[in-house]
Amino acid sequence: MNKLDNILVAVDFSTGSHAALEQAARIAAACKAKLHVLHVVDQASVTALARGHGSSFEIQARISCKGASTALLRWMAHTGISPDGEVEIVVGTPVHEILEWAGKLHADLVVAGIAGAGNVPAGVGSISGKLARKVGPRVLLVRADHSMPFRRIVAGIDFSDTAAEVMDQARRMALQDGAHVDFLHVWQDPWVAMMYTSPFGDVAAPVMAATPEQRAEYIENLHQELRDCVKEAAQGLESKAVLREAGNYGDGIAAHAQETGADLIVVGAKGRTNLSYMLLGSTAERLLIRLPCSLLVVKPDAQG
């Protein structure tokens, strides 16, 4: 499922969506995919304008869409991008409309800026975060300052079924851009058990512990499993199989990406780490808040 036929990019005239548009156009050209551009006029704003001007919602919607269409075509002409697919201007709730159009177009990839018009100083904006949770099968969130090719990619590998799609997408991006890939597996020490408290209030040592030899053997076996797992995906690429010990999957990925200067993280939405839950919980919020680069989330076909 590595081929991309239809790419949908959502734009709101922000700096972030400008970078998203350029990335989407670049990927579409490389994959010979059809590029579709969508701008959603927020219905709450249309309602407020209609009340302010004493007109009906329908009249104000037509006026707003006409103005948005003119502005979008001028904005795209300035970037030199001419999509093969249709440019759509719709009135509605942004997340709902993006999901609706992604389904109508059978989009293989949805692209948006990490931060839209809200211009959050760190992490992702509210709409981008919702897209990461709900869009299937793939969503690419692009940093506002990154419209150029990716040079260093971190692919999160957890040995689940979704990991195969993560490797496919990381490989596609790397071949397209000539990027280096770190196939990263974040692991936790299996010998560290929960601490317990004695009746006298003393904290006891961990229930289980490993000798240095056992730990070294475990790490080497895990490293070999990772190398075997990514062997096919790594063929012809400048890449490395990397183990990183961390207490939290999301923190481990973000820390590695930041330390290595990565400009794209590719992760699965659900695997052994159950990232679909993480995208709704504190772990992924830490990842997204700390996110040092663009993010590509891939999901199992069933979720898509």
Image (spheres, grey):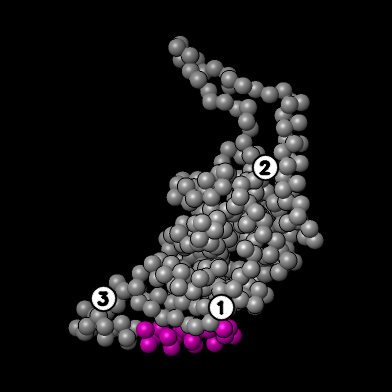
Labels 3 and 2: the sequence-earlier one: 3
Task: Residue lying at the far front in this picture: please name it.
Answer: 302
Q: Do the residues labelled 2 and 1 touch (CB within 8 Å)?
A: no
Given the image, on which type of amino acid does mark 1 rest?
Leu
- The residue that appears at 67% across and 56% down in the rendered structure is 167
Given the image, on which type of amino acid does mark 2 rest?
Arg
Q: How far apart are marks 1 and 3 (CA)?
A: 30 Å
45 vs 264, left or right, is left
- The residue that appears at 71% across and 69% down in the rendered structure is 176
Task: Check disc 1 and report its element: helix, strand or loop.
Answer: strand
List x then y, in percent, for residue 303: 49, 57
Labels 1 and 3: the sequence-earlier one: 1
Mark on residue 35? Answer: 1
Mark on residue 244? Answer: 2
Would residue 83 be counted in the magenta stretch? yes
- The residue that appears at 57% across and 43% down in the rendered structure is 272
Q: Does residue 156 sit above or below 138 in this rendering?
A: above
- The residue that appears at 40% across and 83% down in the rendered structure is 68
Q: Disc 3 designates what residue?
A: 47
**Which residues make up the magenta segment?**
65-84
Q: In which quarter of the image is residue 62?
A: bottom left
Task: Check disc 3 and report its element: helix, strand or loop.
Answer: helix
Question: Quadrant of the image for the N terminus?
Answer: bottom right
Depth check, mark 2 against mark 1: the one in front is: 1
